[in-house]
Amino acid sequence: MFDHEKLRVYQESLAFASWVETILERAKKSSPLHDQLDRARTSILLNIAEGNAKYTAPDRCRYFDTARGSALECAACLDVLVAKGKCTAEQTQYGKELLQETVALLVGLVRSIAPQRLGEEPVEYRASNHG
């Protein structure tokens, strides 16, 4: 195994990347949202792997921050799919739980590398019911 494959955050992100495949089938392949969600899920994994290979704290943190941003982008994409009626909030809940864990683990990694940095506190992900 490569070092990044041993990380729990990488495994959680890989689980999300696999899970979201069925959600992507609900969005037309030609839609910008399909492409955005596909690229963002890939970005999480690639940035975790590359960041884990860096030697300096600022380099590692930069890649982990980018992975965290991509995870939050994925959560927003799931919200848009719900808003467009392509999925229900219940159908996206498991994916958001995986993303929430991913974000928390990435924040933990950054804090362990650079404890002086501020991070995001855990947030409960849920869709609001307006209507």
Image (spheres, rainbow, N blue to C red):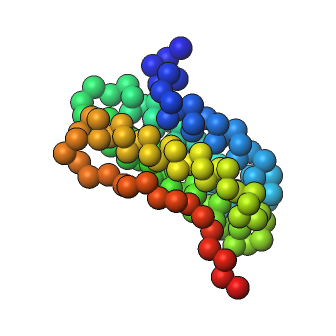
Task: Indicate whether 65 appears above or below 15.
Answer: below
Q: Locate residue 106 relative to residue 41 in the image: left or right.
A: left
Q: Locate residue 41 relative to residue 60 in the image: left or right.
A: right
Can residue 32 be seen at all in this image of the molecule?
no
Residue 72 versus residue 39: which sits nearer the camera?
A: 72
Q: Locate residue 130 relative to residue 122 in the image: left or right.
A: right
Residue at 43%, 54% in the rendered image = 122
Residue 129 location (% of width, % of height):
66, 77
| Residue lying farthest to the bottom in this orientation | 131
Task: Indicate whether 125 appears above or below 3.
Answer: below
Can residue 83 be seen at all in this image of the molecule?
yes
Residue 60 location (% of width, % of height):
32, 35
State how many labels appear. Answer: 0
Image quarter (top left, top right, bottom left or bottom right) of the C terminus: bottom right
Q: Locate residue 104 relative to residue 60 in the image: left or right.
A: right
Residue at 37%, 45% in the rendered image = 107
| Residue lying farthest to the left in this orientation | 116
Residue at 50%, 30% in the rendered image = 8
Residue at 50%, 56% in the rendered image = 72
Residue 21 location (% of width, % of height):
74, 45
Residue 32 location (% of width, % of height):
67, 62
Image quadrant assignment for residue 13: top right
Residue 95 versus residue 29: which sits nearer the camera?
A: 95
